[in-house]
């Protein structure tokens, strides 16, 4: 999924400041700033909004980098 240069820059700043990996920065953005993040995907596809809402309503679970990448790919592919 393509994102704007501005959003990518904000993610990079978050990585630098927090010393977290990109996946963790994005995960935190989804937890604390979903409305702001969703506004950047104009208009957000309905399936993406639904998947995000489902993910946010579930209890957080430990996941490996490989599992996270596979899950993100599945979401991006609309599954």
Image (cartoon, rainbow, N blue to C red):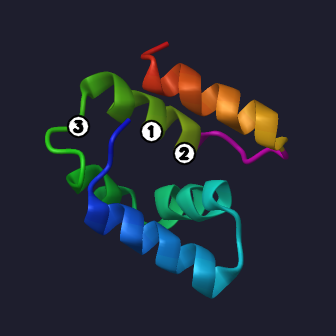
Which residue is at 84% across, 41% downward? 64
Please tell me the numbered disc located at residue 44.
3
Question: Does the segment drawn in magenta span residue 58?
Answer: yes
Report whether residue 59 is seen: yes
User: Relative to residue 6, is residue 52 depicted above or below?
Assistant: above
Q: Residues within 10 Å of mark 1 (few under 14, many from 20)?
A: few
Identify the residue at the far bottom of this view.
17
In this picture, residue 21 sits left or right of residue 37: right
Q: Give residue 56's position: percent from left, percent from top.
A: 54, 45
Q: Secondary structure at mark 2?
A: helix
Instruction: Tell me the CA gap for discs 3 and 2.
Output: 16 Å
Which is more toward the observer, 78 or 21? 21
Which residue is at 21% across, 54% downward? 39
In this picture, residue 49 sits left or right of residue 45: right
Which residue is at 42% across, 16% downward? 78
Q: Give residue 33's position: percent from left, percent from top.
A: 41, 65
Q: Give residue 58's position: percent from left, percent from top.
A: 64, 39
Please tell me the numbered disc located at residue 24.
none
Residue topped by disc 1: 53
Q: Are marks 1 and 3 in contact (CB under 8 Å)?
A: no
Splitting the image into 4 quarters, where does residue 7 fall?
A: bottom left
Q: For the N terminus, give its image quadrant.
A: top left
Q: Give residue 37's position: percent from left, percent from top.
A: 33, 57
User: Relative to residue 24, is residue 10 depicted above or below?
Assistant: below
Q: Are marks 1 and 2 in contact (CB under 8 Å)?
A: yes
Q: Secondary structure at mark 3?
A: loop
Residue topped by disc 2: 56
């Amino acid at each position: 999924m393509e994102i704007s240069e501005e959003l990518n820059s904000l993610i990079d700043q978050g990585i630098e400041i927090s010393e977290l990996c990109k996946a963790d920065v994005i995960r935190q953005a989804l937890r604390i700033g979903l409305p702001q993040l969703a506004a950047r995907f104009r208009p957000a596809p309905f399936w993406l909004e639904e998947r995000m809402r489902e993910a946010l309503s579930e209890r957080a679970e430990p996941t490996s980098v490989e599992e996270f990448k596979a899950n993100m790919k599945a979401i991006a592919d609309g599954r």
